[in-house]
Amino acid sequence: MLELSVRNIGDPDEVRPFKAHGHLDVCRVGDLMFGRGVFEPGWKWSNDVKPIANTDSCEAEHCGYVLKGRMRIAMDDGTEKDLGPGDFAFIPAGHDAWVIGDEPCELIDFGGYENYAKARIERETYAPAAATGDEAAAPM
């Protein structure tokens, strides 16, 4: 049976530091995972997360809401968009991103953070179990 569940991002289940320039707070609410990214001025995915993820570009798909600050998203196909306070965005896998300006960018992501800012070997070895209720982790 499903239960009412409430979490506060100020008390995350996990904090994942970037190589530099910020961190990710992760909260699990029931079967869902949410994240708050705090991206400091100078943060760039290809500099601050790529060394952790060990991929050419961000392989996570994001659906998020910008609380403050500005960020530019550059897709692998060359498409670029800027995000700012109050913007909702869907960002497919295959992108780079960086903070614009001198203010930190803070956003809430409603998906895509299960493996974000984790080493590739950790993602491949410890994938979440399938939705069948099997508790054993399956390789991705």
Image (cartoon, grey):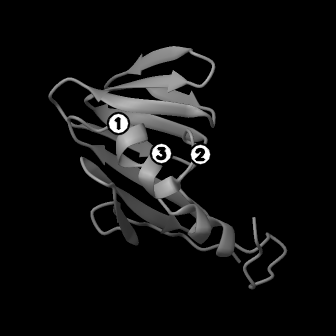
Residue type at numbered disc 3: Asp
Please give left or right for residue 68 compared with residue 111 in the image: left
Please give left or right for residue 12 compared with residue 131 in the image: left
Whether residues under marks 3 and 1 lie with C-beta atoms below 8 angstroms apart, the answer is no
Residue 45: image location, x then y, percent: 41, 40
Q: Disc 1 marks which residue?
A: 44
Q: Residues within 10 Å of mark 1 (few under 14, many from 20)?
A: many
Q: Which mark is residue 5?
A: none
Name the foreground residue: 105 vs 22. 22
SS class of the residue under badge 1? loop
Q: Is residue 131 above or below residue 53?
A: below
3D distance between C-alphas at marks 1 and 2: 15 Å
Name the foreground residue: 76 vs 62. 76
For the C terminus, the quadrant is: bottom right
* Label 2 vs 3, first from the N-terminus: 2
The answer to whether residue 136 is visible is: yes
Please give left or right for residue 39 compared with residue 51 in the image: left
Q: Is residue 137 above or below residue 41?
A: below
Q: Quadrant of residue 33?
A: bottom right
Q: Residues within 10 Å of mark 2 (few under 14, many from 20)?
A: some
SS class of the residue under badge 2? loop
Single out the residue that lies furthest toward the left: 102
Q: Nearer the viewer, mark 1 or mark 2?
A: 1
